[in-house]
Image: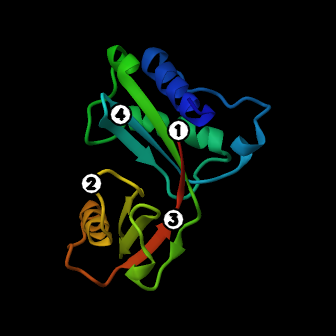
């Protein structure tokens, strides 16, 4: 297991069992000192069990971003009830570290296997990670992301940003 995914696991287990948030060590590896948006996904028997993230960094480093979002994925994803202690052995973790989002001028610049997208209209915003099972076309990716944002799938007057991720399991 990659150290990022291992950190997510430790953060969830410590919080679910003891209601403690892992504190950041004084000495961090250089890759964890950087700042980036991070999504943490939890799966149980291959099915999504929670996913929460930030497309721009909210914490001072990746370590704190992973801890924050791992706990939120386990306890705050509105699609699921909070993870219980008896489930912990059945959960697998992945951590996506996002690149800085960039605005696109045409949907020909998208590829759902390579790029995640952020769709915005006014105060409504939706995000979809790249390379998701069952999302094979740009049209599917846009439709799902608009629906997540509460934007009509037929609405063409939206801002679209794309980003890449480094996925760690």
Mark 4 / mark 3, whichever is N-terminal:
4
Q: Earlier in the sequence, mark 2 or mark 4?
A: 4
Residue drawn at x 66%, y 52% is 35
In this rendered view, identify the residue nearer to me: 43 or 81: 43
Secondary structure type for disc 4: strand
Judging depth in this view, the residue of 100 and 166 nearest the camera is 166
Q: What separation in Å lies between label 3 and label 1 (alpha carbons)? A: 21 Å
- Using the image, tell me which numbered label, if any, was put on residue 68: 1
Distance between mark 1 and mark 2 Cα atoms: 28 Å
Where on the picture, by quarter, is residue 122?
bottom left
Q: Indicate the secondary structure of the residue bearing disc 3.
A: strand
Q: How packed is label 4: few (under 14 Cα within 10 Å), some, or many (20 or more)? A: some
Task: Quickly name the residue at label 2.
Answer: 134
Crowding near the residue tagged with mark 2, few <14, some 14–19, many ≥20 C-alpha atoms within 10 Å:
few
Residue in the image at 54% along x and 33% along y: 5
Q: For residue 163, which numbered disc appears in the image?
A: 3
Counting every numbered tag in the picture gives 4
């Amino acid at each position: 297991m990659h150290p990022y995914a291992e950190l997510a696991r430790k953060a969830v287990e410590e919080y679910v069992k003891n209601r403690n948030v892992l504190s950041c060590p004084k000495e961090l590896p250089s890759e964890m000192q950087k700042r980036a948006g991070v999504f943490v996904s939890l799966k149980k028997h291959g099915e999504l069990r929670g996913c929460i993230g930030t497309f721009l960094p909210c914490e001072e480093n990746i370590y704190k971003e992973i801890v924050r979002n791992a706990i939120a994925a386990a306890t705050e994803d509105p699609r699921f009830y909070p993870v219980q202690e008896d489930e912990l052995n059945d959960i697998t973790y992945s951590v996506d570290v996002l690149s800085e989002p960039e605005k696109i001028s045409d949907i020909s610049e998208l590829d759902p296997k390579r790029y995640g997208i952020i769709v915005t209209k006014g105060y409504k915003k939706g995000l979809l990670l790249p390379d998701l099972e069952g999302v094979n076309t740009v049209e599917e990716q846009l439709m799902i992301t608009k629906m997540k944002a509460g934007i009509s799938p037929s609405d063409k007057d939206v801002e679209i940003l794309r980003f890449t991720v480094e996925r760690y399991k």
